[in-house]
Structures are given as structure tokens and as C-alpha cells.
Image (cartoon, grey):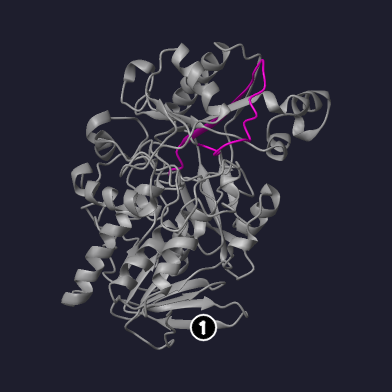
């Protein structure tokens, strides 16, 4: 049975956010007898709320509060995150690759790169590999634990055929947290193609339908949906004492806590730390290094679509179940450092209409939509160099409906990223041209879903925000519990690594709570 804790209970761990980070940490702590209050800004959806309608689900899932984008981050929606129980796991397309060993040692491996802030992770693959093992089994990741890969869609078959024609060989339907056969009470994927809208049959793993219910089966978990945290509360000794939040009735409340863990996705995690400044922490909490908000990364991403000579019907099949890994390596002879992957992508007719040509108007638009079934697509996901001035800050005057300063996301492509995009886009064109493609459509600047950095882990408090466990250097009972922790981005989709970091953080927290060190 789920618990209900008093606002004055100083023994609880407060977790802000219920996505990959917060939902995983909530489960791990509660099943081990730690009292958890999880505060989620968005509503809780049921399986019946999820429909195969991209526009309806975008409005149900997305964080639509005002945000400002600068540079190459589009204004209005510089990032695409979610405001719902389950966080961005409700939206994600469920790709689950691991980091490669060299990606944990980017600074050592790549050498100097101008205008970057590369560092090595404070641990390597050997340290996190056991947690990857647990996470893959927990999520039911295809291609691991004797779980079959998903079947290939037509879109995949086109990508694979073109990739092989230009010499690529490391190609399959990807490690996916989407059931290829029934598992853990969830059915096998029916190839409906609406993965980023939430899975209507629950074949896709989410914290909403997995970790949150598992936590609720204990006597140690109190979930409060539609509860927007506005401030982390501090005492005069520099300890976090709880949080202030606005509940679903608009009432301001304060929940006391023994430990506070922030897992609000990168923008909201940063905004909360900066908004919670005190006289002792005038630049925001955990920010003595001046690194909070800096080193924001979003992966180097570009979408490439091709008009093929025959029908592809890309909307049929698991949305991103397909990957080309041949370029996941460091090879400066290509004209850039670090690696990238190309993985499958499909867009529905409405998304194509809004994004690919002429803003949904005119002859070119009409011709494209008439040939929608002939489109094939991939997306580049490449390592994004950390840059000090790619950062999240607070607007000096503009506030949101809660009276909080609006987040400003400043992001500009590094020259290395532009070289990577040019190279990858050319490879994608070669791939599809080898099969007779006639027209190409490329999209670079769009709201980022892989938001990383801003509160990175490291051994040196002068250059990082948290230690290797996600415990902030400045405040020992304040933890960061999401993708903000990444010192570098690697080329891998981040969710599996976030979950693995939280399994590791949970072990550390449980031990620390038991021995009284926090």
C-alpha cells in the first residue's frame, strides 16, 4: 500500500520528478524500506488516457510552460521534456545503448579541442557495467538477457539496404526497452508506430507503469502529482531541510526532508537550484564552482528524410527500432572528433506537414504530402562537446505562472558538431541515393530531448557540481538525480545510463542513510 507522510516528517527522502531518474530512485529506495515523498509537477495519466494521436498526446505529455531559446536552441521550445508522472519516459522512443569505454574518457581520448570543457568521468565502464546489467534486465532491453530483437520495419529494411551499399555493417533493430515478446505483464509490441506519443498497449517500458506502481506496492512511497516544487529550503548550517511546492489545488506547502534529490530534467533541475539561492549560497545551491547551468549538452542531432522511388510506409513499425553503429568511434580523419550513430526515425503525416517543407502550404508541400508513403528517415545522434557558454540561466524579468523566473536555454553548435552533421548528413544521402532517392529533407534545429550536463559529476569541487554519486559537493544531503550529472554526452541515447546511475546512487544513499553519514 502506498504511504502518506506528514509535511513535518523530517525523516523522508524528497525526490523531485518521477521520470527515468526520479522514478528509478523512488523504486529503489522504497523497496529497501526508505521513506520517499515523490513530487511531480504534472498529472498522472492512465493507460486509457494514451491514444494513437500525436497532437493530442503532445499536449497531454509535454512541458509547455514558457522557455526562452537563444542561438541554435529554438525559442519557445528549446527543449522537449514532459510534465507528467513518468516524466520523459512517457514520451521516449526507448533506445537503450550503453556508453563505450572511450566515451567515459573523452578528455583523455580526444585531446585538446578549442572552446570546449571536456573532462573525464570520475569512473569508467567497469564501474557502471554491473548497473547496466541490472537496468537492461529491469527494462527488458531487446538484444540482452536472451530477449529477441524487434522485427524489422519497411523503414528499417530501406535503411539497412542503403547502409550496406555504402559499406556499413554494424546494423540491427537496436537495443530497445520495448517488448519483442510478452514480459513482466506487458505485451509484445504491435508495431503501431506511435512510440513517442506513449504506448497505448504498454509494450514500452516507462516509470509510469512500472517503477511507480512497484514503489506503491511498498509501505514507503508517497507520490504527489501536480505538485510544482518552487524552492529547496535550507537552514543556517547549510543543510537542505525540505522543499516548498504548490499542490494541485494551488496551495503552497512545505515538506520537510532528511535528503532532497532533484530529478526534474536538466532545465527544471537547473532552474530550481538557481531559484533556491540563499545568503549562504547567493549564486544558487551547489554552485560554488559556478558550474550549475553550464556545460549544457543536447547531443548533435539532425533528421534526414529521403523521398524513395517506391512506398516505404515509414509510419508502420516501431518508431526508432534501427541503428547503424559503424561511426561510433573516434577517428579525426573524418574531419571531427568523437563518434555518432544513425538510427531509424519516422514521423507521422502531421509532423511531416509541419516541419519538412514550406510550413504546410504551397505546391511543394502538396507534392510531398501526396508522396508521404515514399519517405524514409534516420536521425543523427552524436557526441556534443561541453561548452561553458552553452548554459541554462534565469531571465532577469520574465516570470511564469508560478512567479518563477523563466529559464533561458543558450546553445550554439561547436564547429566540431557542424563538421559531424555535415559528414553524417552526406552519409545518409549517399545511403538513400544508392537506392534511387530523388529528394532530401534535413532538419537541424529542433527542441532537444537528450538534455545533459549543467550539474556534472567529478572529483574536483572547483570544476564540478557533484561527486561521483550525484551528491552535491556543497550540500551533503542534496543530490542531483537525472541527466544533469553527465560530464560528457557520449553518442548513446542517455536514458539507460541515467537509470544505471540512479541504481548506483540508490545503493550509496541507502548505505549513507543506514550509517548516518547524511
The residue most toward the left is 515
The quadrant of the rendering that contains the N terminus is: bottom left
- Which residue occupies 57% across, 68% down? 44
Residue 19 in the image, given as x and y percentages of width and height: 46, 59
- Which residue occupies 54% across, 51% down? 91
Picture quarter containing residue 441?
A: top right
Q: Nearer the viewer, residue 344 or 15?
A: 344
- Which residue occupies 32% across, 42% down? 146
Residue 436 in the image, given as x and y percentages of width and height: 61, 11
- Which residue occupies 42% across, 82% down? 3
Q: Is residue 299 magenta?
A: yes
Tell me, yes or no, if residue 110 can be seen here.
yes
Tell me, yes or no, if residue 465 can be seen here.
no
Magenta residues, start to end: 297-320
Task: Say which residue label 1 marks.
Answer: 253
Residue 232 to residue 283: above or below: below
Amino acid at each position: 500500500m502506498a504511504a502518506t507522510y506528514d509535511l513535518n516528517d523530517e525523516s523522508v527522502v524528497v525526490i523531485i520528478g518521477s521520470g527515468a531518474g526520479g522514478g528509478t530512485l523512488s523504486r529503489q529506495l522504497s523497496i529497501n524500506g526508505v521513506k520517499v515523498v515523490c513530487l511531480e509537477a504534472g498529472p498522472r495519466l492512465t493507460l486509457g488516457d494514451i491514444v494513437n494521436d500525436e497532437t493530442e498526446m503532445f499536449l497531454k505529455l509535454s512541458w509547455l510552460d514558457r522557455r526562452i531559446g537563444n542561438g541554435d536552441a529554438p525559442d519557445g521550445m528549446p527543449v522537449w521534456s514532459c510534465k507528467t508522472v513518468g516524466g520523459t519516459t512517457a514520451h521516449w522512443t526507448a533506445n537503450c545503448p550503453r556508453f563505450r569505454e572511450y566515451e567515459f574518457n573523452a578528455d583523455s581520448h580526444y585531446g585538446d579541442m578549442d572552446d570546449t570543457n571536456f573532462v573525464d568521468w570520475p569512473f569508467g565502464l567497469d564501474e557502471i557495467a554491473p548497473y547496466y546489467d541490472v537496468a537492461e534486465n529491469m527494462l527488458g532491453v531487446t538484444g540482452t538477457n536472451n530477449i529477441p530483437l524487434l522485427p524489422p520495419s519497411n523503414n528499417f529494411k530501406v535503411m539497412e539496404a542503403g547502409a550496406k551499399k555504402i559499406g556499413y555493417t554494424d546494423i540491427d533493430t537496436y537495443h530497445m526497452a520495448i517488448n519483442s515478446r510478452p514480459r513482466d505483464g506487458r505485451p509484445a509490441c504491435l508495431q503501431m508506430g506511435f512510440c513517442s506519443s506513449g504506448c497505448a498497449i504498454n509494450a514500452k517500458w516507462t516509470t509510469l507503469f512500472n517503477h511507480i506502481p512497484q514503489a506503491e506496492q511498498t509501505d514507503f512511497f508517497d507520490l504527489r502529482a501536480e505538485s510544482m516544487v518552487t524552492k529547496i529550503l535550507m537552514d543556517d548550517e547549510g543543510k537542505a531541510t525540505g522543499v516548498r511546492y504548490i499542490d494541485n489545488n494551488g496551495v503552497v506547502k512545505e515538506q520537510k526532508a532528511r535528503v532532497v534529490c532533484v530529478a526534474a530534467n536538466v532545465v527544471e533541475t537547473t532552474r530550481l537550484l538557481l531559484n533556491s539561492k540563499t545568503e549562504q549560497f547567493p549564486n544558487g545551491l551547489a554552485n560554488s564552482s559556478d558550474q550549475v547551468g553550464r556545460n549544457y549538452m543536447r547531443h548533435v542531432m539532425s533528421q534526414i528524410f529521403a523521398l524513395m522511388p517506391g512506398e516505404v510506409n515509414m509510419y508502420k513499425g516501431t518508431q526508432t527500432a534501427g541503428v547503424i553503429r559503424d561511426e561510433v568511434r573516434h577517428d579525426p580523419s573524418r574531419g571531427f572528433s568523437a563518434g555518432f550513430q544513425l538510427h531509424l526515425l519516422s514521423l507521422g503525416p502531421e509532423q511531416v506537414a509541419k516541419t519538412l517543407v514550406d510550413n504546410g502550404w504551397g505546391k511543394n508541400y502538396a507534392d510531398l504530402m501526396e508522396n508521404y508513403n515514399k519517405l524514409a528517415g534516420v536521425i543523427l545522434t552524436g557526441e556534443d562537446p561541453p561548452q561553458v557558454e552553452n548554459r541554462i540561466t534565469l531571465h532577469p524579468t520574465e516570470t511564469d505562472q508560478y512567479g518563477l523566473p523563466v529559464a533561458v536555454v543558450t546553445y550554439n553548435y561547436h564547429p566540431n558538431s557542424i563538421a559531424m552533421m555535415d559528414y553524417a548528413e552526406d552519409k545518409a544521402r549517399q545511403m538513400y541515393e544508392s537506392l534511387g532517392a530523388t529528394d532530401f529533407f534535413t532538419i537541424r534545429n529542433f527542441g532537444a530531448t537528450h538534455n545533459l550536463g549543467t550539474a556534472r559529476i567529478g572529483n574536483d569541487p572547483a570544476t564540478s557540481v557533484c561527486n561521483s554519486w550525484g551528491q552535491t559537493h556543497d550540500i551533503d544531503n542534496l543530490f542531483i538525480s537525472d541527466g544533469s550529472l553527465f560530464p560528457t554526452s557520449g553518442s548513446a541515447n542517455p536514458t539507460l545510463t541515467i537509470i544505471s546511475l540512479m541504481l548506483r546512487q540508490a545503493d550509496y544513499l541507502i548505505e549513507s542513510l543506514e550509517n548516518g553519514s547524511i
